[in-house]
Image: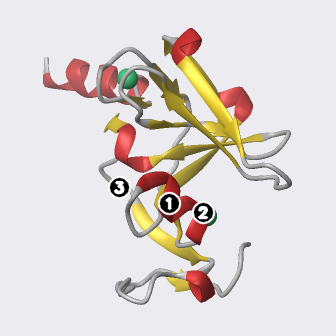
Amino acid sequence: MICLYLNLKKEEDMIKGHCNCGAVTFEIKSEINDIYVCHCSICRRSTGANGISVIISKISDFKWTNGSNQIKTWHKPNHDWQTSFCQTCGSTLPGENDDSRMYIPTGLISEGDDNFKIVHHIWVESKAPWDEICGQGKQHKKGL
Ligand SMILES: [Zn+2]
Ligand SMILES: [Zn+2]
């Protein structure tokens, strides 16, 4: 029985997440462990915190499992920055990073984040004065 359980668990190796109200859910069919933390002023304002931490997946590995019609997106004028959020609860949601990759805010993850680790801090040169970065993650003045 134990072996069977382990086999089943391995097959379901998947990352899952949802917004605060549960309307929007998603899953990622790949093993990702690397976290990027962006400390830029735009991400800071967007989250109301010291920035945002995300994982990056291939668009083809990412799937909305519910509520994709609940998503609103805001593009910052004259900028390539954009954010997506749940129109009910306001949780920051995954979005397209470029043509092939999605960024997924790590705070949304409910399953599959056991081995997540911060590996990169980006836009450190525009971090808030009170934002103390610690840990092993590599610090980059600008983006990657
Ligand atoms: Zn929501
Ligand atoms: Zn940022």
Q: Position of residue 128 (x, y in %)?
A: 46, 82
Residue at far left of view: 1
The foreground one among 137 and 81 is 81
| CB at disc 2 and ligand 2 closer than 8 Å | yes
The foreground one among 54 and 19 is 19
Amino acid of disc 2: Ile
Q: Position of residue 86 (x, y in %)?
A: 47, 26
Question: Label 1 vs label 2: CA separation?
Answer: 5 Å
| Placement of 50 over or under 26, stated as above or below | below
Q: Closer to us: mark 2 or mark 3?
A: 2
Q: Closer to us: mark 1 or mark 3?
A: 1
Residue at 82% across, 55% down: 79
| Mark identifier at residue 115 | 3
Tell which circle, 2 or 3, labels the residue nearer the N-terminal end. Answer: 2
**Does the CB distance between marks 2 and 3 fall below 8 Å?**
no
Q: Which residue is the site of mark 1? A: 45
Q: Which residue is the site of mark 2? A: 42
Residue at 42% across, 23% down: 11
| CB at disc 3 and ligand 2 closer than 8 Å | no
Q: Position of residue 42 (x, y in %)?
A: 60, 62
Instruction: Provide the secondary structure element on which disc 1 rests.
Output: helix
Amino acid of disc 3: Asn
| Mark identifier at residue 100 | none
